[in-house]
Amino acid sequence: MKKSIVFFLLISGLSFSQQKDLKIQDLQPKSENFVFPVVTYPANPSVANKINTFLQVNELEYISNSGGNPFKLASTATNSYSNYVYFYDWEKLETPKNILSIGVNGEASGAYPEEFSDWKNFDLRTGNYINAEDLFQTNAAKTVAGLIQKKIKKRVNDFLVKLKSEKNPSEEVQEQIGLYEGCFMDYTLNGIRYFFGKDKLTFVAGRCSNHAMRALDDLGSHELEFTYKELEKYLSIYGKNLISGSEKLGQTGPGNKLYKGKIDGKYPITVLFNEINEDDSFSATYWYDKNKKPINWRGEFVHDHFSITEDDYHSEELKEWIPKALIEANLKGNKIIGTWQDYKTKKYLTLELEEL
């Protein structure tokens, strides 16, 4: 009990003003369709650099300081998913001192326009993106996911009860009932958005409707609030230290992290690993520091071992990707050590990376 009291006294004593040295401005060139955050943090410039690199590579597919307009791919739909993506505004949220949470709003247009809201959360001690699964003990992650699912199901079921109570339901109401009865609600920590508040963590699950059915969906996205006190018994050492304001870190995985190193001991590269999915698959972007042109990786991460393919081109004749290189490497602490093998020549080059 005493530990719990101390933990939450620490949280309640944290002040938003402790981040006053951190500022967020608009990435240039700002325009009506592109209002995108860029962080400055004089107390720790390397942290700001990591955050900005992550945001720009992850959201804009642009490598920081590589020249040109950072919004070019998003504005011309020449990004990897061939959608126009616009960013209309951002917001810095009030959080415990170790955490930066930024909310962004925008619109993505493929076959049709779709508004979106998203949140990016960073550890201000390291500059690393905060993965939801890292916040909780390994054996508690499913429990927390279950709590989230329970809240979604209650929200949907309560609304279904209301809809079904109508004596002469209209065709629209009957369609709504079908929509909510078929709603996907089995979200896991790996597939849900979230953001930090001063004294609570909010998970945001996707709505029950697809775009075509959106007009029928009165519930919209599910925002599910949990106080830090409610979650305390499930938190990992990392999660407790992060939220309480401690400078002690705790162990986290390689997902959504930046690494620097060399291929063949002489070609400096930077790698951004994306999220490690529940099936152990992941994608990554890397670039040679000299030319700053993004190159994509895809692979699996199992038992601290990476098996990665770097594709060369897509063969229309074979209807498949032709590899350029195969990478095998092991995670050893904060380092990744392995080999980069040229697919054609079979020549091996060393790969050595270290977490930024």
Image (cartoon, rainbow, N blue to C red):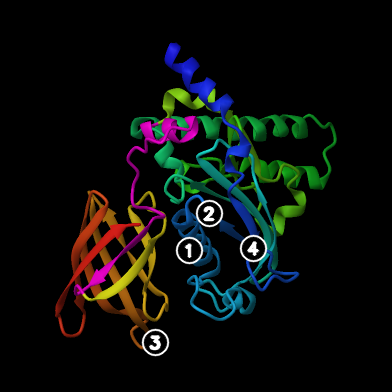
Q: Are marks 1 and 4 in contact (CB under 8 Å)?
A: no
Q: Amino acid at mark 4?
A: Phe
Give the residues in magenta: 236-265
Measured Cα–Cα span from mark 1 to mark 2: 16 Å
Q: Position of residue 303 (x, y in %)?
A: 22, 49
Residue 339 visible: yes
Q: Nearer the viewer, mark 4 or mark 3?
A: 4
SS for dot 4: loop
List the residue tagged with mark 1. 53
Measured Cα–Cα span from mark 4 to mark 3: 37 Å
Q: Nearer the viewer, mark 1 or mark 2?
A: 2
Q: Amino acid at mark 1?
A: Thr
Q: Position of residue 46 (x, y in %)?
A: 44, 57
Quadrant showing the C terminus: bottom left
List the residue tagged with mark 4. 36
Q: Amino acid at mark 2?
A: Pro
